[in-house]
Image: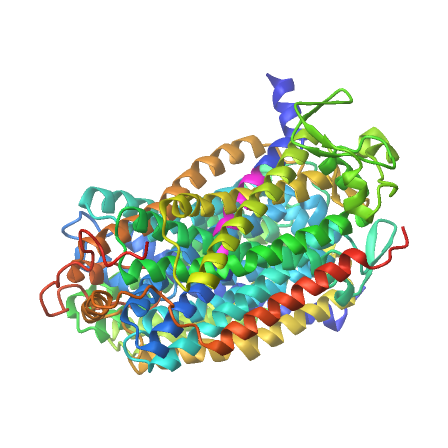
Amino acid sequence: MGTVAHVLAVNPVPARSQMGSSLGFHIILACFGIAFAAVTMTAEWIGIRRGDAAALLLARRWSKVMAVLVAVGAVSGTVLSYEMGLLWPGLMGRFGAAIGLPFSFEGIFFFLEAIFVGVYLYGWERLSPWAHWWSGMPIVVAGVLGALSVVAANSWMNSPAGYTLSHGKITRIDPVSVFFNASTPYETTHMVLAAYMVTGFLVAGVYAVGLLRGRRDRYHRLGFAIPFTIAGIAAPLQVLMGDIIARFIEHNQPVKFAAMEYVPRTTRDAPEWIGGIFINGHVYFGAAVPAFDSILVGFSPHTRVIGWDSVPPAQRPPLDTLIHLSFDLMVGIGFFLLALAAWQGWWWWFHRRLLVTPWFLVPCALSGVAAVAAMEAGWIVTEVGRQPWIVYRVLLVSNAVTPASGVPVTLGVILALYAVLTVVSIGVPMFMSRRWRQGAPAEEEAEQVPYGPAQAHAGASPGRPPATPRSPDGGPQTR
Amino acid sequence: MRPSPDTIGVAAILITVIAAYALFGGADFGGGIWDLLAGSAERGKAPRELIDEAITPVWEANHVWLVFILVLMWTAFPPAFAAIMTALFVPLSLSLLGIVLRGVGFAFRHTAERLRMQQLTGALFAAASLITPFFMGTAVGAVATGQVPVHPVGNVLAAWTSPTAILTGFLFVAACAYVSAVFLVPEARQRGHRDLTRYFALRATAAGVLTGALAGGTFAELSVSSPHVFARLTGVALPLVAISIAAGIAVLGMLWMRWYHALGLRVTAAIAVAAVVWGWGLAQYPYLFPTSLSLAAGSAPKASLVGEFVVAGLAVLLVAPGFALLYFLQQRRMLTAAETDAGLRLAAQIEQAPRGQPALAQAPIGARIATALVLALLAIRAIRNVFSPRDR
């Protein structure tokens, strides 16, 4: 028993699992923090510009959901800042002076976001329409800049720069090089686009389900069209960006790239593996496209691709199969989402109508979950692919992990708590939408969201509940 | 070795942020404590509602203060941060647990419909308000007594279970309850609840006396457990300690005289808390961990400290006006819960029925051309990228 406890305490695996699960949870909420305001404000813009009540109603309801998600995100974000120290004192103690800087800037943007979410959420009634619209703008800007700061910190772990070490201690820092390290432009763009895709496809997916259930009114069409368009614009950019980033990784972190693409030995004519499990030097159940990996890397089959044999076994990432399959999953879903966007775009271009056939809507309903899966897979590729380093080629994970015992316990507690938080962040919006559909305004006003000034209590709203906006057979159908 | 001016400056910012967290976060936690002590569902209904109304607008900001403390610590004083997080793994994890439970309880209790569920989430919220300040207090006690080793090899149980640390934990809880009750007195009065004003004035007095007693006990303990801090508390930092005591007595006096002046009460209580936090900071000088790790040895390179000044400057430039706007709008009663969506709903429905056109039917010609241009540009760039010569 004692030895088991000892192994668990020294082994970085529990700490890595805890960090991974906390981050994997937070990243989904962070997407909403980054992109949801833009989606909501687009709806509001349409609503104000065209006097469209359905769009305004959507924007108003989305702002309430946004408040809940940002609040849960604030909690899970606090957990992450604690964990940076609780789990990785070896990283923060040595490199806190460098990696801490981008996080400090993130603090400001988070502050701004929290303030203006409050103004936006509670300014609907009394602010003039355009003043209210503009009050949402800081959320959009702060969301993107905040993402930039945090992802810059992660980029730094992949491409450490801007510091001088002497005797294992940092003696000089160049903040600009820390922020804008080699990986920053790639990782931040990739993440911001991912946030827009995740948010857009998830929200669109909700209304795709509504449309599939026969609620084909303007409210549901707009609720689908607005986020889908935003995500659909991000999708091709993301595929393009992904291609560029893959080549950058091949150049910057060749061993990670080798794990992503199953390149055991440095070689020309490297095949591109699609799927497959890597065991003892063989790829099983995978399809290889001859020389295609070389072509993707250098546009010629003769391009030399560096394999993981270029570094000693102790410096190679573990779990090649996980990294490779995650990479394939991310790329596959990326193309699937691109195809969906292109399908709608095609239809729109030639017919000027929203495509609402079930053949299109069923995959759309799943697109949000798919986008989340792709993003999580992408994080697995970046993070597991960097192993065994926590700071690439500078600091090993095993030298950064806390020597404190008790991580397996906190891991268990965190998993349980995050299960609850997941229920909250999915359950509360679902609960709200059920109330909205029941169409009793008195109840809707009673709903409290964890933000902003104290509210007048329910019952103050006069007037009878109007008929539900949902009509049984829906509005006229397009096709 | 004397710490550089930059180090002292960042340490001053850190202490200021800690004081802000002690004040605002403390009031927030205290609200949870009074919620816990408010009695049965029926008896405690009125105070609970007041606490809820008072806390709702501010609870978010507290996370931000805490996050600022963490990032300031790890950027400006990395070795100290790493040592604290390792040696005090257990109390800090427990305080984190409290923060998460509080968030869950808070987010959920407003949407929970049934009374049972509300009670459960409410209990979660209240219990969490108790554990977080207590364990944070033990951590501060451990640091102040110099029990945190500079290079810990694991958790140090003895550091945060010393009498001083435990007393500090209780002191934190009492101080939170005190600040919160003082803040709630004018809140109740402004809303015209006379009985609640008395209710919280009584509790503020009790908590104030208890806080004073615990502070005295901790002070006495420090003379044995941390001679350096004690010597400076009774030396250089004595004026601050005196200010804190005087302000604390002044608040009790105001409550005794039933002079419930909103600003007067709040500011005096704030001075009492801020002065004692500053006193602690001054007493630790020039050490991060009294006598084992000095500020000079534990601070980051100059550029990181300057970076933190920039962050603080930006915070003043950007966040302060944001807060001012929020406060201004709230005072002008421009921020209200949406009164009703009924009008919008009706309008949306009317509009949806007669028009057969789907959403976004008429994109203006300009938008179409712009989209086509952007797409074409992107396509050209992509193609050029593929065929551009490579040195590989």
Residue A29 is a magenta residue: yes
Q: Quadrant of residue B336?
A: bottom left
Residue B229 percent coordinates (x, y) = 62, 58
Q: Is residue A305 above or below residue A235?
A: above
Q: Is residue B184 above or below residue A269?
A: below
Residue A373 percent coordinates (x, y) = 53, 42
Q: Image check: B186 left or right of A107?
A: left
Foreground pick, A407 / A51: A51
Instruction: Please tell me which residue is depicted at 40% across the width and 44% down the height of the picture.
Output: A359
Residue B378 is a magenta residue: no
Q: Image check: A178 left or right of B14?
A: right
Q: Quadrant of residue B188?
A: bottom left
Image: magenta residue range: A18-31
* Majority secondary structure of magenta residues: helix
Numbered circles on residues, count: 0
Foreground pick, B351 / A154: B351
Image quarter where the N terminus of chain A lies is: top right
